[in-house]
Each structure stands twice: as C-alpha cells, then as structure tokens.
Amino acid sequence: MTAALVGLKAFLRRHTLWAGFVAALLPLLVLLGVQSVWLARLARASATVHRAALGNCLEAISTDVQNYYRSAAESSLDLPPSIFTEGRFDAAAIQWNRKPIRGVRRYFLVDFTREPFGHFLVYDPVRETLESPPASDESLAIVVACLPWSYGGGGADSLSPSADERDPDHRIILNPIADGTRLVGVAGMILDEEFFRSDLLPAAIQSALRDFFPEAAREDLAVTVRDARGELVLGAVGGQDSGDAATARFPFVFTDWTLGLRSRDFTPERWASANFRFNMMLSAVLAIALLGGIVLALRAANRAVRLSEMKSEFVSNISHELRTPLASIRVFAELLRLGKVPSPEKVQEYGEYIEAESRRLSRLINNILDFSRIDSGRKTYRFIRADVAEVVATTLRSFEVRLKHSGFELAFEGPVGPLPRVEMDPDAIGQALHNLLDNAVKYSAESTAIDVRLAREGAWVVISVRDRGIGIARDEQERIFERFHRIGTGLVHDVRGSGLGLSIVHHIVQAHRGRVRVQSEPGKGSTFSVYLPVGRPAPGPKIHEAVASESSPLGVRPDA
Ligand code: ADP
C-alpha cells in the first residue's frame, strides 16, 4: 500500500506538467459536459417559451381588434328604447353624426314596434338623415341579418351586440334594443373592411409586437393575415415558406380570417439551437483559454523545478570539479615537500602538473564568476582591435601541458593569408576557446586527436575545435548552450562538469555579434566553430565596455 503511494508520488513528481494538466482538464470536461446538458434543456425550454410568446402576441392582436369593435358597438349602437317606442329616429341620426366611428361603412335601424317584420332605415351621412334603404345587396344583407328578430324572434337572452358575417362583403354588428323585456328594435353597423385591413390591423400588430418583443427580435418576426379564402392580405412570406410558428383567429368579427406569426429566418427551435451553439462555443473558447493559462503556469513551474534540480546538480558537480585538481596538487606538492622525487626531470614534470591543475582551477573559478556576472547582468567586455591568431596561439600554449599529460595530439591549421584584426575582448575569446578545448578533451572518450582551425570565411573569422569523441545527438545540439544543461549525465557520459562552459561561450560570442555553430554526430565527434565578424566593429569607441545580454540559444547558428 505504502509502496504504491510512494510510487504514485514519484510518478506525479516526474510528470508534474501532465498531472497538473489532467487535474485541470478532468473537472473542466465534467463542467463542460454538465453545462452542455443544461444548455440543451434550456434550449428546449426556451423554444417552448418563444412559441408561447408568439401565441400570446397573436392573442393580444385579436383581443385588441375585438375590443375596438365592441366598444364601437357600445358607443354608437347602444340607443335608448324611446327612439323606437316614440319614433324619434332622428335622435339616432344626430348621435351618429356627432360621434362618427372610424371603420363603419353604414349605420342602420330596424324598428319592430310598428311592423313585426321590421321597419328598416339606413343612415345617410351626406344628408344626415335616416332613409328607407334602396334595393341593394347591402339592404339584403341587413334584412337577412335581422331576420332572427322579426316577428318577435330572438329574446331577452340575446340582447348583446352580435356579429353577422354570412355575407363577407357586408359584415354587420347588431345590437338588439329592448324596452323592458320587449324587443323594440335593432341598431346596426356595416363594417368597412378597408379600414380593418389598412388601419386597425397594422396598428394592433405594431402595438402587440412592441409589447411582446424587444426591438432586435421584432426585426426577425413577420405577421401574416389571411382572409376567408386563405389569401394573404397582410405580411409577406419568404422564398421558402416554413409556415407560421403560431396562428390565431379573431373572436368577434372577421372570424373567418387567420392571423399568423413566424420568424423570418429562425424557427423557435433554430433560434434556440443557435443560442445553444453560441453558448457552448463561448464556453469552449473560455475553457481553451483557461487550459492555455494552466499549461503556461505549469510549464513555468516545471522550468523552475528543473532549474532548481540543475542547480543542485551543479553544486555537486562543481564540488567534484574543484576537488579533483586540488587533490592532484596536494599529492604532487607533498611528494615535492618530502623530497621523494628522484630526478630533476620528475620535479619539472610534477611542477608542470601543479601548474596545469591550478590553471584548470582558476579557469573553473573564472567560469563560475563569469556565469554569476552574466546571470546578474553585470558581465562586461573590453573590446580592442586585436589579432585573433595571437589569441589562439596564446590559448593553445597555455593548454599544451594539459594536452600532453592527457596524451592528446593537437593539430593546428592556420589561415591561408594574414587575417584582419578583429574588434574583440581577447581575454573573453581566449576563455571561450579554452572552454571548447576543455570540452574536446573531456568528451573525446578513447580518441586523442583534436584539430584546431583558424580561417577566414567571407565576412567572418572562424575558430573551430574538432574532436572525434562521443558526439552530440541532434535534438540536444541547441540545448547544450543553455546554462546548467548537461546531456543525460551517467547515461551518455560520466564526465563531471558544471554545465556552464558552453553557456559562457555562447554569451561571449553573442557579445561580439558573432555566432557559435556545432556540427556533431553521436559516436563520430563534434566540431564547435566560433564565427567573429570582420569589419563589423562592436558598437561604441575603440576601447569600451559592452554588456551582453543573455539570449536564447536558438540564435547561435551563423547565417552564412
Ligand atoms: P560541462 O561542464 O558539462 O562540460 P558545458 O556547458 O561545457 O558543460 O557543456 C554542456 C554539455 O554539452 C556537456 O555536459 C556535454 O554533454 C555536451 N558537450 C559539450 N561539448 C561536447 C563535445 N565536444 N562532445 C560531446 N559533448 C559535448
């Protein structure tokens, strides 16, 4: 149990990035899943709600129309029975003249007090009097409409306004008038269809749409009105008629007409599913952004962990690096002090050892100091116009003893002609070459041959160090210039080192506006080339100090 727990902990530590990513991804996916279920439900519900809203809107239009005609009937047809019983028909004419109602084509009266069949009078708005109706379709429609009350028909229970639409060209509203329980007459009006179609309906539609839908939604809605024959009298149907999403009828008059409401582009379902898609897409984009942020944060954390691991490895490596030359120096110094050295040649040899080892020590310490300066941005260079060949020769000379003692053979290939002097910091370039030579010795394995070449290549002076050692895999060739980076210590090689040498070389060469190039093949050896620009003086006066900044090792290859 505990072993499994320890194993899991170790696994999580090794795969922090992935573990963190999965830990963030899983709840996010669950959240997205739950959200999509809820959004789908919401979409279905909103489609129903939308459809209901369409229905309510139509209901409002038809109620509006009904209210208009009912109140018209109330205000102009609700006449006192004395008009009929006392024969004061002119009183009705005066009222209709004083308060004309829009949408009425003709007013009429039927008196049943004198004739049981009915005495018919129609209102003439020009002469403002009631006249006997001429023989016409209109008169016939009035007669037919009033038939139920002839000869004492109808009753007290039917004394409210009603509509007669048997003749669609003459739609009539009738109001039976009683004196007590006795029916004395009928007042009526013939409706003006044109007013209904062009004025009343459009106004009712506009007001209902305004009340039920916000402006943006109104743009998408279309109301259709069809007459008794099913022909469209109002509204337009698009190319592909998807049908009305909701329909309604008028309850009082124009009962054979149909009202319809539809979305021009969207049915309620399409509208809901578009909403669903938009919401899901928004969530997905947010989730991706969140994951991106998490990945970035985890990467930064991972880098920090790696750097701290590299630093502790560096401390252990550097201690070892310091101990080895110190141990040799102590042994040789002891031998000399105890006088145990047999011959003057041996004394000289041991002296050379001590000298070479202390040089190695000071180079190592220089590297550490340089690294610390580079790290804190305090590294400065002193540029002078100098001879690269001289710097190379001096460095090789100081390396000679180390090479001799390690059994290495160094072949130097000089330039064909004289080299131009180059603007540089000779100490820094010497240190860079030193680091490359040091690596060539360290990573040569069985091979003992090192070639150094100095040449001019176009606008560059090139210093190359070639070994025939263990080589470097392609995917590592850029990363070896990163600070502390060492290739799989213990697996590829077990040579100790600080992981600083090449990062310092990179920094020095960059400060010279040069490039470092590595060509290498595992098992065959490596060639490191430093390219220094000719005739491209470093910025500033002839002797000056330049602070070089750390930059990505990706830019270390020469363009040439
Ligand atoms: P170190 O102190 O480890 O040598 P460097 O920065 O000089 O640090 O080099 C980084 C890594 O690059 C080394 O650990 C080694 O793995 C690899 N390397 C450098 N030079 C060579 C070379 N000439 N041949 C093979 N590998 C090399």
Image: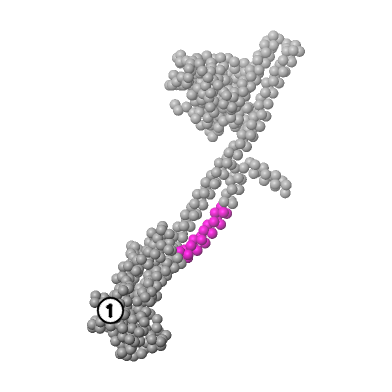
Q: Which quadrant of the figure has residue 376?
A: top right
Task: Give the vertical position of 13 relative to 166 (above or below).
Answer: above
Q: Position of residue 10 (x, y in %)?
A: 67, 42
Residue 555 lies left or right of residue 484; in this view the side is left
Question: Residue at 73% across / 13% down in the picture?
Answer: 336
Residue 339 lies left or right of residue 520; in this view the side is right
Query: Element under label 1?
Result: strand
Q: Is residue 32 magenta?
A: yes
Question: Residue at 58% across / 18% down in the picture?
Answer: 409
Q: Which quadrant of the figure has residue 401?
A: top right
Question: Residue at 33% across / 75% down in the picture?
Answer: 228
- Nearest to the observer: residue 67 or residue 35: 67
Residue 74 appears in the figure:
yes
Question: Residue at 46% across / 59% down in the picture?
Answer: 273
Q: Residues within 10 Å of mark 1 (few under 14, many from 20)?
A: many
Q: Which residues are magenta?
A: 29-51
Q: Position of residue 282 (x, y in %)?
A: 49, 51
Residue 3 lies left or right of residue 68; in this view the side is right
* Mark 1 beta carbon near ligand 1 (under 8 Å): no
Q: Position of residue 23 (x, y in %)?
A: 60, 48
Q: Which residue is mark 1?
A: 123
- Nearest to the observer: residue 61 or residue 556: 61
Q: Quadrant of the C terminus?
A: top left
Q: What amino acid type should be assigned to the residue bearing mark 1?
A: Tyr
Q: Position of residue 59 (x, y in %)?
A: 42, 70
Magenta stretch mostly in which secondary structure?
helix
Task: Give the vertical position of 537 relative to 89 (above or below).
Answer: above
Most extreme residue toward the right, as rendered? 338
